[in-house]
Image: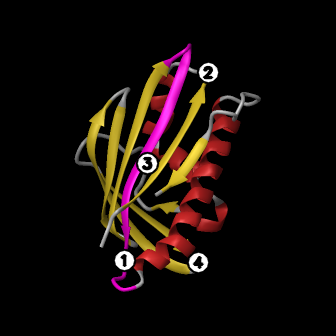
Amino acid sequence: MANHTLEAEMWLPMAIEEVFAFFSDITNLDRMTPPWVHFQTLMPRPIDMRAGTLLEHRLRIHGVPIYWESEITVWLPPTQFVDEQRRGPYKRWVHRHDFVADAGGTWIRDHVDYRPRGWICAALINRWLVAPDLRRIFAYRHQKIREVLAPGSSAEKDRVTTG
């Protein structure tokens, strides 16, 4: 069974340190997640984000309640962090967040290596449910990040693809 990928990127006219600080605050993850996912972080705040931090969330996927536990496995401020699912809806989920200073602003790049659960129909589940949901969720994230951090800035370089 093959892994799938999601690639997303956007550029903001902000310093890399400011952008990384936004992503370092778990409260912003709740803000960036679409309301139809009913996403909720379960731990008390503030959370000390660093390698080894465990994060617990509750959400709904197509109405099904899901518990999701992930671990921050890489923490390299202000350029990168990685979260990996430990328990949750995927067989595999490794999400690398890269931040690159460029042209007076910052590129936010997401690379997700994932594998839906299931055996025989995992490819179909990905094609018809998972990949479209992920594209929609990351497009929403881009919109919310832009609204909060850089209102009025151009979204023409934003991109979300799955493969």
Q: Nearer the viewer, residue 120 or 68?
A: 120
> What is the secondary structure assignment of the residue under circle 1?
loop
**Within 10 Å of the Cα at label 3, are there few (<14), some (14-19), or many (20+) other Cα atoms?**
few
* Residue 67 drawn above or below residue 41: below
Residue 21, position as x, y percentages in the image: 46, 30
Image-based side of 28 in relation to 95, left or right: right
Q: Amino acid at mark 4?
A: His
Q: Is residue 38 visible?
A: no
Badge 3 is on which residue? 45
Residue 81, position as x, y percentages in the image: 34, 39
- In which image quadrant can residue 61 be found? bottom right
C-alpha gap between disc 1 and disc 4: 15 Å
C-alpha gap between disc 3 and disc 2: 29 Å
Badge 4 is on which residue? 62
Q: Is residue 66 visible?
A: yes
Q: Main secondary structure of the magenta part?
A: strand
Q: Which badge, 1 or 4, comes first in the chain's sequence?
A: 4
* Residue 160 drawn above or below residue 37: above
> What is the secondary structure assignment of the residue under circle 3?
loop
Image-based side of 83 in relation to 37, left or right: left
User: What residue do we see at 43% from left, 37% from top?
Assistant: 24
Residue 22, position as x, y percentages in the image: 51, 34
- In which image quadrant can residue 39 be found? bottom right
Badge 2 is on which residue? 13
Badge 1 is on which residue? 117
Q: Amino acid at mark 3?
A: Arg
Q: Amino acid at mark 2?
A: Pro
Residue 94, position as x, y percentages in the image: 33, 54
Q: Which badge, 1 or 2, comes first in the chain's sequence?
A: 2
Magenta extent: 102-120
User: Marks 1 and 3: in contact by CB < 8 Å?
Assistant: no
C-alpha gap between disc 4 and disc 2: 35 Å
